Amino acid sequence: MSNNNAVFDIGCRLCPRLSHFLNETREKFPDYHARPVPPFGVASPKLLIVGLAPGMHGANASGRPFTGDHAGIILYEMLHKYGFSNKAISTDLDDGLVLKHCRITNAVKCLPPGNKPIGDEINTCNRYLVEELKTIDKKAMILSLGLVSHKAVLKALGLKQSKYPFKHGKIYQLDDGRSIIDSYHCSRYNTNTKRLTEAMFSEIFIQIKAQLKI
Ligand code: URA
């Protein structure tokens, strides 16, 4: 676990490569958020969803995780279908979307070049996840979208990576009452190739609802 834990900071510039890339992006797209993207949702969620990182023309543009991203279409549809929000679509910060029992965040808060954060960046940003995980419900579920998110969550919780291998659909019950559920990331690539189908993603939310009893 990091010794430099910190609450989300929109002014964070700890990763030189990401900071430089955001500066370039702001110049190219002056209307974009192009800063670290804050978590979105309730303060003490029963469900914390952890994605990878903002996409260039999605969360990085809108300033809300998975908003404007292809990946967000299916994610926000599922949240609405299973009672975690008041609307099925997330378009922008002023769209009136409200999440219930749920918060969405990313393992890396800044847009990475090529959608690929490097190890140092994932580790540096982990301090924010550590703090976010302290605020979730005592019996909360953490939905890790993809391997990078899964590993970042384990690291933030101080859990041994080898004891909890990533597996789609697997629920790990933790000793403190919380649990982690893994899903393939709902990226365009994974949904186009059918690695993650709508039915598979639905099944993840059915498991979540069953366990949370909400
Ligand atoms: N948008 C995000 O905010 N996170 C992802 O992991 C993918 C798209």
Image: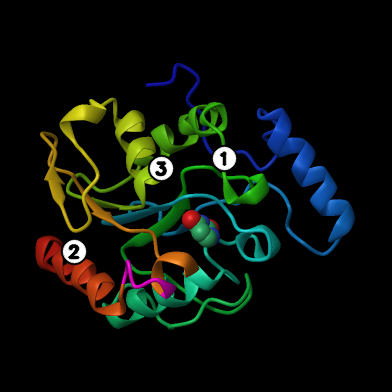
Give coordinates of residue 153: x percent, y percent.
34, 38
| Element marked by disc 3 | helix
- 182 left or right of 59 in image: left
Name the amino acid, label 1. Answer: Pro
Nearest the viewer among 118 and 34 is 118
Name the amino acid, label 3. Answer: Val
Give coordinates of residue 21: x percent, y percent.
76, 43
| Element marked by disc 2 | helix
Res 186 quadrant in image? bottom left
N-terminal label among 3 and 2: 3
Rendered view: 107 above or below 191: above
Q: Are marks 3 and 2 in contact (CB under 8 Å)?
A: no
Residue at the top extreme, as displayed: 3
- Magenta region, residue range: 192-196
Label 1 beta carbon within 8 A of ligand 1: no
Residue 69 colored magenta? Answer: no
Distance of label 3 from label 2 (alpha carbons): 20 Å
Rendered view: 115 above or below 16: below
Name the amino acid, label 2. Answer: Ile
- Give the residue pinned by disc 2: 208
Residue at the front extreme, as displayed: 193
Give coordinates of residue 210: x percent, y percent.
10, 67
Distance of label 3 from label 1 (alpha carbons): 9 Å
**Picture disc at residue 148:** 3
Q: Are marks 2 and 1 in contact (CB under 8 Å)?
A: no
| Element marked by disc 1 | loop
Identify which residue is drawn at 40% across, 72% down.
191
**Picture disc at residue 117:** 1
- 77 left or right of 158 in image: right
Distance of label 2 from label 1 (alpha carbons): 28 Å
Res 76 quadrant in image? bottom left
Q: Are marks 3 and 1 in contact (CB under 8 Å)?
A: yes
